Amino acid sequence: GGSQESHISLSRPSLKDFRDNAEQQHIAAQQKAALQHAHTHSTGFFITQDSSFGNLILPVIPRLEPETS
């Protein structure tokens, strides 16, 4: 039976988890804003990606679909 798993979800998240989650939400909002700005003011292609250098978005070369003849 899966009765054990239901008990785990009852534990309350710690303050650290809450802060981490809030930070993730903040970063996600920043990424969305940066992406919108980039798409509005640039002809390039961008993706959101976690970067060890703190970049919210990265420019990418679009993948071209292989031509079917």
Image (cartoon, grey):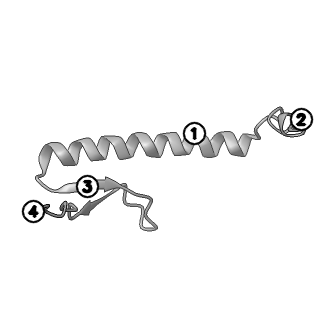
Helix, strand or loop at mark 1: helix
Image quadrant for the C terminus? bottom left
Nearer the observer: mark 4 or 1; the answer is: 4
Helix, strand or loop at mark 3: strand
Task: Look at mark 2 in the image and give the residue it sits on.
Answer: 3
Disc on the earlier residue, 2 or 3: 2
Task: Look at mark 3 in the image and give the residue it sits on.
Answer: 46
Helix, strand or loop at mark 4: loop
Disc on the earlier residue, 1 or 2: 2
The reply to whether dot 2 and dot 4 touch (C-beta < 8 Å) is no
Q: State the residue at coordinates (20%, 65%).
A: 61
Helix, strand or loop at mark 2: loop
The reply to whether dot 2 and dot 3 touch (C-beta < 8 Å) is no
Task: Look at mark 1 in the image and give the residue it sits on.
Answer: 22
Nearer the observer: mark 2 or 4; the answer is: 4
Label 4 crowd (10 A; few <14 / some 14-19 / many >=20): few
Label 1 crowd (10 A; few <14 / some 14-19 / many >=20): few
- Amino acid type at circle 3 is Phe
- Amino acid type at circle 2 is Ser
Disc on the earlier residue, 2 or 4: 2
